[in-house]
Image (tube, rainbow, N blue to C red):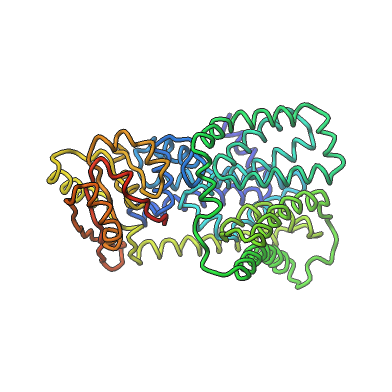
Amino acid sequence: MILTKSKQFWQSLRFSERFFILFLLFSALLWVLVPAFSWVCLPYDPEETLSWGSAFNWGSSKHPPLAGIMLFHFCRLFAFQNFSVFLLSQICMTLGFFFLWKLARCFLDRDKSVMAALLITFYFFYNYETPKFNANTPHLLFIPMMCYFFYRGTERNLLKDWLLLAFAGACACLSKYSAAVLFLAFLLYLVLDRDSRKCLRTPGPYLAGALFFLLLLPHILYLFRTHGLIFHYISEGKTPGWGYYTQIFAMTGALLVPPACMAFAAYLSFALGKKSFLPFRKEDASGSRKGVKFVSVLMGTQAGVLLLMGIAGHRLELIWTYPVFLPAGILILSLIPTAPDRRSMNVFAFLAVFWGAWLLGLVFEQGNFISKYRYHLDKNLLRQEAEKFYREKTGKEIAFVSGKIWNSALLQHAFSFRIEAAPMADPLLLSLHEKAIRGQDTLLILRSKKDLVCHADSILKSRNGKIPWKEILVPYKARFGKKKVYRCYLVILGDAYLAPIPALDAE
């Protein structure tokens, strides 16, 4: 019975929808298997995110808490094996594509909706960067959810849509504060669209606002307790390596190039499919004016906020542009008056598979032929060295580790998170472990001798002029790469090191 219904369902789908399902399944599978096969350890971002989640705090000095909590407790189900990080990334990706497709279906036909959802794959962030799970990754799910349930709320005005919008919006803001810009876009759309304003006369939006506030309340209280320290990182953080006008120019380019690439992929699919350089002359299908209006407001508001921040002199990171492009495929396909035929869909499918395979091959090549310590360092070898040194000097087992973010997080991961850790660059996490630190010797991992020299005076003061330390060399190599050696320094600190030692610079 189930097989019969499944077969009937599959036969009822168009070619584009079958391709969409198969593409998502195989893409997710391969983006789990290739990094899991290629990387011995985890890169910087997922190790850092796991470290945040292990403390189960309502935030850090860098980001809200949800990404860390999601990743830590999901990976816990799989004994913190590396593949679980990549699996969670692809779950977020696949569900995000589903909601992006659902949003596209509000404006476009079945074929165009598939194209609109998958055009985002031509922006490298949505495949090449996703294995490196960080605070941005949950956005790939929650931002499409926000957009979909907001639009459905304005169209159907059902309470469940508004409450789901509140849930998705709270999760997005608890992953990264930049999601709040979308609420500004939603407000602007309500002002511009007369039909949508009618929903403001009903209780749905206001009940959603109350639920949104309740979901954020624990984090809001946390911000008060920590005196909003996280906003110090947001307002200052890393300083870009370019000047004022160069930064604005680079951000403008970062806002224009990805949608241009997506538009070119769409044009190429129609042009090669219809065998014409001007494939849009025949107006056999109309675009969606509603879709153009909705997506233009979403993209324009986010892009405008980023550019205003740059003009005001705020630091900008090019990766911050990624939420702008999520609905760009809907805008592009809404402006194309031609319906895609089977040949155009075949060309689009080939381009999507070719581009995805090329990026996947790039990760495979870099992961297996180029030795990099943040991908190929065996954390168990580091653990053995650390345990041996600590036991020789103290006669005890390691209970707490600190130092540079990636080093301390990697060692904590090597112990399957049975020890506590907090980087010296994160005073909030350090404060959580203060009682544990005060009662024992802390193992400090420094990345270079320069770090050891810079902090020698402070360390010596905490140890009354005597400090145990050791230089260790850990070999690493890619599967087919050159053998290299990773050098770091282990230091054992007394229980009074927190006050005299300043925080190391964030990486």
Give the quadrant of residue 186.
Answer: top right
As drawn, is 384 to the left or to the right of 404?
Answer: left
Q: Residue at x 58, y 38 (%)?
A: 171
Position of 98 relative to 219 (above/below): below
Question: How many callouts does the rendering have?
Answer: 0
Say if residue 111 shows up in the picture. no
Q: Residue at x 70, y 38 (%)?
A: 149
Q: Residue furthest bottom?
A: 277
Give the quadrant of residue 335.
Answer: bottom right
- Which residue is more in the foreground, 366 or 502? 502
Looking at the rendered image, the quarter that the C terminus falls into is bottom left
Say if residue 342 shows up in the picture. yes
- Which residue is more in the foreground, 2 or 144? 144
As drawn, is 437 to the left or to the right of 156?
Answer: left
Position of 305 relative to 105 (above/below): below
Q: Position of residue 75 (x, y in %)?
A: 40, 39
Position of 107 relative to 447 (above/below): above
As drawn, is 268 to the left or to the right of 437?
Answer: right
Q: Residue at x 69, y 41 (%)?
A: 148
Q: Position of residue 60 (x, y in %)?
A: 46, 42
Q: Position of residue 361 (x, y in %)?
A: 45, 63
Looking at the rendered image, the quarter that the N terminus falls into is top right
Q: Residue at x 62, y 52 (%)?
A: 323
Q: Position of residue 183 (x, y in %)?
A: 70, 43
